[in-house]
Amino acid sequence: MSKNESVIPLKTLLFSFHASNTVIISFLPLYLQYKELNETEIGWVLAIGPLASMLAQPFWGYMSDKYKTVKWTLIICIIGLIIGGTLFFQMNTLITIILMGAVFYFFTTPIGALGDSLAQRRADDLHIAFGTIRTWGSIGFAISSLVVGRVLDVIGIQYMIFPYLFFGVMALLATIPLKDVEVESDPVSLKDVNKLFKNKPFVIFLSVVVLITISHRTNDSYMALYITELGGSEGLVGLAWFVGVLMEAIVFAFARFWFRKFHSMVFIIAAGILYSIRWFLYAVVDDPMYIIALQFLHGLTFGVFYTAAFEYVTRLIPKLLQSTGHLVFFAVFFGLSGIIGSLAGGAIMDNFGGNFLYFIMGCLATAGTILLIAYHALPFGKEK
């Protein structure tokens, strides 16, 4: 079997899951607005996902490492995605949406991290670039954002459950033939996990990048509402995500050419600078078409930042704790940052508007980048 054939199920899984995730990230705020929730209430609902992920991601990462299987952990979580998603979209009141959302997110949030963790390990085994596998997740996200945006323009935002479940079932079918990870070691224990939190470079790095990831997650939650605030439609929201994630896919696809030339931290810091520029530009626009035009920066910010940070974290943590370490990284990147971004972002947008929200995000990214430069200058900021 060729290298390409051996990772086809993994590429299909990443494509399908991120295609389903597009529906949630891109259109859930508009769906909640259709349910007559205001921006602050939408922020409460959006914060449930990251809050659940703070518990779910380390839990499922630990279970994966303990039983030495990523595949079966993924299958359980995807089944939870399908059942939980079906129930979540039946809820109509704020309290039931929040409660069912917590159950739904408990299963869905670890899937991306587990898929990427498996992709990193398979890439190492086959001596290929992680980005060449991960790019299929971005392709799925890009295609889904464009197609689903057009579909919802026609059928209405209230029917977003159907494309979501379609991609969810597709992800489950792709997981069945998946090649599992093989780790030749004793099962991980809670005592081993404690080593992660005694790893000073790992803990300090996560503490520093959280300022940048808060701005990223705030954009995930509120770009759709900002575009509609500026007069855009669901179709334009989908187009904006398509342009951004297409650039992200290109960055991932060519990671093997650019990534090895410099230290990981150089790319992380460069992406932090671009994040700052990106948010300040978004803050001054007055037409949704400018947002779409500037979305090419998504690939140069998230694509570069995530690839380099994931690689850097992988080198900081022992092989025995790869899944756990990756999911702790995810818990900070998409969990803690998402909680803060959703709650604070909703309140700021409700009271001061989208322009001011993006200005604050630019300030956060700038502060985070300055701290990253300081971190890199210290001895433990450099890889051994």
Image (cartoon, rainbow, N blue to C red):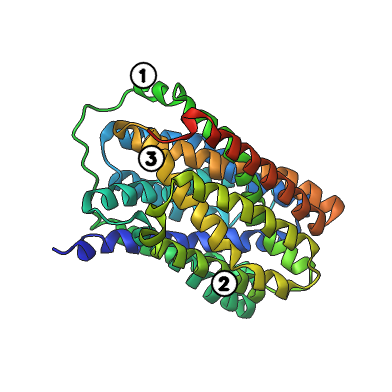
Reading the image, the residue beneath label 2 is 243
Query: The disc labelled 2 sits on which kind of residue?
Result: Val
Calculate the distance from the C-alpha at mark 2 to the C-alpha at mark 1: 45 Å
Q: Nearer the viewer, mark 3 or mark 2?
A: 3
Asked which secondary structure carries label 3, the reply is helix
Q: Are marks 3 and 2 in contact (CB under 8 Å)?
A: no
Query: The disc labelled 1 sits on which kind of residue?
Result: Lys
Calculate the distance from the C-alpha at mark 3 to the C-alpha at mark 2: 29 Å
Asked which secondary structure carries label 2, the reply is helix
Location of the N terminus (image quadrant): bottom left
Q: How many neighbours does mark 1 have within 10 angstroms: few (below 14), some (14-19), or many (20 or more)?
A: few
Reading the image, the residue beneath label 3 is 314
Q: Position of residue 181 (x, y in %)?
A: 24, 45
**Could you tell which of marks 1 and 3 lies nearer the N-terminus?**
1
Which is more toward the observer, 138 or 170? 138
Which is more toward the observer, 266 or 140? 266
Q: Position of residue 195 (x, y in %)?
A: 39, 22
Reading the image, the residue beneath label 1 is 191
| Residue 267 sits above or below residue 27 on the image | above
